[in-house]
Structure formats: structure tokens, C-alpha cells
Amino acid sequence: PPPAPAAAPAAPAPRWAPPDIVVNAPPSGLDDRRWRDLRRGKVKPERTLDLHGRFAQEAHGAVRAFLADAYADGLRCVAVITGRGSSPEGGVLRRELPHWLNAPDLRRILLGAAHPHRANTGAVHLLLRRRR
């Protein structure tokens, strides 16, 4: 009889992955008061990126660089302004931003995201994790 096949190597233990960022959804690991302050616009952004007039590819690169620099500088709250867009479902940048924020390299530095005012959905405040 043929020899028994060798056992398949054990799958590596999954690494911890932070939960997805959902704009206006309370993140785990953040106390209620801090989340309420972020959602109500009481946490002032330390830096702002305005994406008005940019194409999606250029805006994507700008968001990645902006967040990496903000994290490296130890900032805790930043704002990204996408604009609301002219179509009823919102602009391309506004729709794409949540997808960009959930890229693995950005997801690990972000804690939460919220529109600072119900009437202004064209701006998002992002709470960054503390540097370790």
C-alpha cells in the first residue's frame, strides 16, 4: 500500500485584526463620553485634509499619506472633508472614504469615525489610536 500522506501543516494562528471602521458607528474600546464628544463635534481636529476637486485616485493617496503623517506626529483627531457630492447618493469620494479607511494599514491606526454634525455629511472626524 502507498504511504499515508503527511499531515498538512497547521494553519498559523490568526493575528488580531481591528474591527472595521463604520462612520457614525461606535467603535469598541472607546468610552461613551469620548464617542459622544467626537460624534457631536466637540473633539476639535488638529489637522484637516480637504479633498474638494480631487479625483478618486489622487484623493486616495492623499488620505493615506495624511493619516500616516498625522499618526507619526502623534495627533489624535483629524478631519477629512470629502464634500457631499451632487448626486442624491453622495459624491464618489464620500462613498469611497469608508473603504479606504478599512485598508489594513490604516485600520490599525484608526479608532473611530463620525460626521461631526448631522447636517454636514461631507466632513468626517477621525479619531486616531495613540502611538505606542
Image (tube, rainbow, N blue to C red):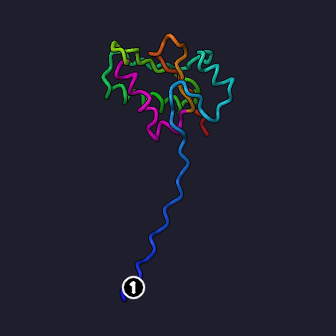
Residue reaching furthest to the front: 1
Which residue lies at the image location 34% right of the left edge and 12% below the top edge? 86
Magenta highlight: main SS: helix
Q: Tell me where the magenta segment starts and ends, as one range.
A: 90-110
Residue 66 in picture, x, y percent from top left: 45, 27
Q: Quadrant of the C terminus?
A: top right
The residue depicted at 62 percent of the width and 35 percent of the height is 28
Task: Depth check: give the residue in front, 5 or 56.
Answer: 5
> SS class of the residue under badge 1?
loop
Residue for point 47% across, 36% down: 106
Assess disc 1: are there few (<14), some (14-19) or many (≥20) residues with their C-alpha within 10 Å of its C-alpha. few
Q: Position of residue 6 (x, y in %)?
A: 43, 77
Give the camera-side residue of 27 and 88: 88
Q: Quadrant of the N terminus?
A: bottom left
> In x, y percent, where is residue 57?
31, 28
Residue at x-position 38% and y-position 27%: 96
Q: Position of residue 123 (x, y in %)?
A: 47, 17
Q: Which residue is mark 1?
A: 3
Left or right: where 43 falls relative to 107: right
Q: Is residue 37 above or below residue 1?
A: above
Instruction: Please state which of residues 35 and 128 is positioned toward the viewer in this rendering.
Output: 35
Instruction: Examine the structure image and report whether residue 50 is included in the region drawn in magenta.
Output: no
As displayed, is residue 52 above or below residue 76?
above
